[in-house]
Image (tube, rainbow, N blue to C red):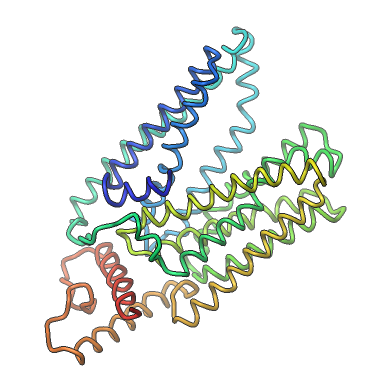
Amino acid sequence: MCFVGGFLIDQVFGIRAGANIFMGLTLIGQLLFTAAVYVNQYWLMILGRFVFGVGSESLAVAQNNYAVLWFKGKELNMVFGLQMSIARMGSTVNFWLMEPIYQWVSTSSTGTKILGLSLLIASATCLFSTICSLILGYMDKRAERMTRRSEARTTEAVRITDAKHFKGTFWLVTCICVTYYNAIFPFISLAQQFFIQRFRMNVKDADHISSLIYLISGIISPFTGFLIDKIGLNILWILISTVGTIIAHLLLGFTACDPYIGVIILGVAYSVLASGLWPLVAIIIPEYQLGTAYGVCQAVQILGLAIVSIITGSIVDKWGFRVLSIFFLGNLFMAFMFTSILLIIDQRERGVLNLTPGGRKKHQEVILEEIVQRQRLLSAEQLPVDVEAPAQESADNNSGSDDTRLRNRYISAVDRLSS
């Protein structure tokens, strides 16, 4: 659904209406699920989870689009890190609070009503998110009016088949996303039993160390994102985080080293990758196709995680956790290979994915000037608007609009030149 949802955001709803619609579906799905548990109706629980899934995954695509729209060219890596930080802190709080809430409700209720009321309390977070979505939509509409952002928007139509024309670098980023996250989320879902069997922990300590991965990444993600914003070199950071994750799984799966060391390395490496990887999509893909692109990337990631979750469960049942660690390492070595290929292709094509922020801006200006000069030599006709030199922009436009036009003209012009 996130692939379809991304296309709908690009072509049908727009980012504001899309975010509110998908947030509404998420809230409705959660309330349906809560009501189904309260009255003990399993079929209604399934329906609630279905509606929730339709809304929540597409909502994540809208969230990424908002981040790119408001922060590209400035603090985008830090913003993606901050997004992940808040999400991971939410997951950590969920680890800590839901059981005490359940125990508290059980003192005054019985049967399935205990879990139903507990989920109703948890639904308050979805209601809060809905309010935030509405406020954000109002803020974005006001910002669009004040900055005249709509004047810089491309008129090119988005088709759902555009995905097959995305650049190879985008598909490499998608492959990195899938193979890397295959070694993170399935591990966390099995972490309690892993630490109980591998390190002889009790349930309480196993839960604590399992939540530590989210807690660490939640705390440091804004700082790693800020660091990448200042330094750039996104692909290099992805390579470093992949190597760090390999080291963490080696320590956890095959040594007697204190497991907290491996978990700390894993949490830090995870936060670095998330801060450095997701903004690359906004550099590769034109703005008018970003919803579709993020939808494709997230759809492939989720499909991979769904399949791998079944595989990892079977591996643990048949061969145990040592083989599971080997499986995770295999995914990470593939992620390292895809990242290395991405770096080689980017350098060969004089790309901008692994440059510093200043280097990216300078590189784009040089490429635009080369295209302008070539067009002037080939034809005496007036230059198309989308390849005019940045100096021809009117001085009264704000810097955010200039960045938008420069970036879209750069991607469009390079695509035309390569074809």
Q: Residue at x 33, y 83 (%)?
A: 366
Quadrant in which the N terminus appears: top left
Extreme-left residue of the structure:
381
Residue 98 image position (x, y, % from top left)? 61, 26
Q: Which quadrant of the view contains residue 28?
A: top left
The vertical placement of 410 against 375, above or below, is: above
Q: Residue at x 72, y 50 (%)?
A: 263
Left or right: where 115 falls relative to 261: left
From the viewer's side, name the closer residue of 368 and 222.
Answer: 368
Quadrant in which the C terminus appears: bottom left
The vertical placement of 402 against 191, above or below, is: below
Q: How many marks?
A: 0
Q: Residue at x 69, y 62 (%)?
A: 244
Left or right: where 293 falls relative to 314: left
From the viewer's side, name the closer residue of 262 and 358.
Answer: 262
Residue 25 image position (x, y, % from top left)? 39, 32
Residue 179 image position (x, y, % from top left)? 61, 58
